[in-house]
């Protein structure tokens, strides 16, 4: 594995910031975007279940509809790629079965040999376990792993990003025809390249003092 | 900024997996670990508020206590560094004020000039906004950004990781003296180096078909 240096990693993370103004004329090149989509697909999730779907919005008309449901934030229309992270609203034994079948298919083994894993997931997520009572929230948390992964991946490739929690999920679900899909919009991320005019880019990064954030035990 | 190539990024993400067995004799070098702590500090969060604290557990006695509260998973004691992500249980105007003062300090401006930002955060998170009714969950989601960021950062540095949701938060909070701290344990991550014996390392990675995960609009 071709690792990166520690300074390359922290340099990218210092460089990133929540981009307030995108250069609407710059698009993310196809190869770069493909890698970021691959990063989304490879995002880790609880049990590997991936209880989400990523909507990549490039259609200008759809974005124009989403902007007023995003407190008018211009990143929605000015960025190169706009990602809406949707999370499963419910999880049934059929989803677990589909996942088990997928494992069997990819690894060339029988679904029967995965019975223990299936039963464990069903017990935890479907039939009365703690998580079964909080599926939408459990799924949303997995989505947040994915957006964390995406923002870090983007920074390493020199792509700017702005995570967006300030939007109206109900309106998004309506505009994106999610009402009967089993998924609901959870969080968004605008990606592209910062505008030269974005003065937020040069502001000093603010973090709490390390002693308040990290404790060694 | 010294960006990484797309193949370097996706190569690292393909390389990573939820490590089931760590080589207990291998420790993460200081410089590498410092970069990962820096990645934690630099993790993006809602409004920049960082409603969390990261506990880095290296003390063997504490780890031995945590293992039985982690369904007996051996990664807790065998990994190099064990991170417990804790999230704020409540948020008050005093936390917003502390953050505003921190911005003022870092950027050399007056806290008064940030009144609009403070009022906006108070409105949303403290005095009756939607988020004010779900602070523990809002905080937990920010924690999940951090663990997503950490897992991706670790992979790029060639460090193995295993995210751990299977643990008893109440017992963790007791063992780690969190009961009156304002924070509660939310998720964990073991980091270090895979054991040569971990047969999970060579299993084919399973993801849902791309058409089920990604939709272009």
Image: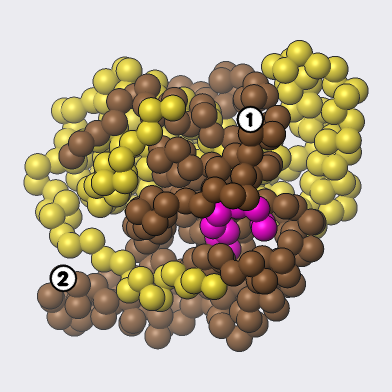
Chain colours: A brown, B yellow
Q: Which residues are magenta?
A: A76-85
Residue extending furthest left? B197
Left or right, B133 with reference to B155 = right
Number of marks: 2
The circle on residue A107 is 2
Residue in front for this viewpoint, B7 or B129: B7
What's the residue at 90%, 23% (across, down)?
B112
Q: Position of residue B51 (x, y in %)?
A: 65, 38
Question: Under tag 2, what secondary structure?
Answer: helix
Instruction: Residue A201: give its label.
Output: 1
Vertical comparison of A76 with A178: above or below? above
User: Where is residue A171 shown, x and y percent of the image?
Assistant: 74, 72
Whether residue B67 appears in this view of the structure is: no
Name above or below for residue A198 compared with residue A164: above
**Labels 2 and 1: the sequence-earlier one:** 2
**Eye-nearest disc, 2 or 1:** 1
Image position, residue A116 (x, y; %): 25, 73
Question: Which quadrant holds the N terminus of chain A?
Answer: top left
Tell me if A213 is positioned left or right of B40 in this view: right
The foreground one among A146 and A129 is: A146
Indicate yes or no whether the magenta region holds residue A8. no
Give yes or no for contact between labels 2 and 1 (Cβ–Cβ under 8 Å): no
C-alpha distance separating marks 2 and 1 = 45 Å
């Amino acid at each position: 594995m071709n690792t990166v240096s520690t300074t390359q990693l922290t340099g990218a993370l210092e460089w990133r910031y929540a981009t307030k103004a995108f250069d609407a004329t710059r698009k993310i090149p196809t190869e770069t975007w493909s890698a970021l989509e691959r990063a989304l697909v490879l995002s880790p999730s609880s049990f590997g279940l991936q209880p989400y779907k990523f909507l990549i919005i490039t259609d200008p008309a759809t974005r124009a509809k989403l902007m007023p449901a995003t407190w008018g934030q211009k990143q929605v229309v000015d960025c190169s790629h706009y990602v809406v992270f949707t999370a499963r609203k419910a999880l049934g034994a059929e989803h677990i079965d589909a996942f088990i079948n997928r494992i069997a298919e990819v690894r060339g083994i029988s679904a029967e040999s995965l019975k223990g894993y299936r039963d464990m997931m069903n017990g935890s997520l479907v039939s009365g376990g703690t998580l079964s009572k909080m599926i939408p929230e459990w799924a949303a948390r997995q989505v947040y792993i994915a957006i964390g992964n995406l923002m870090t991946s983007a920074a390493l490739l020199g792509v700017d990003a702005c995570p967006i929690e300030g939007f109206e999920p109900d309106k998004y679900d309506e505009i994106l025809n999610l009402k009967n899909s089993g998924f609901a919009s959870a969080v968004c991320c605008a990606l592209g390249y910062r505008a030269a005019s974005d003065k937020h880019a040069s502001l000093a990064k603010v973090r709490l003092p390390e002693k308040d954030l990290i404790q060694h035990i």
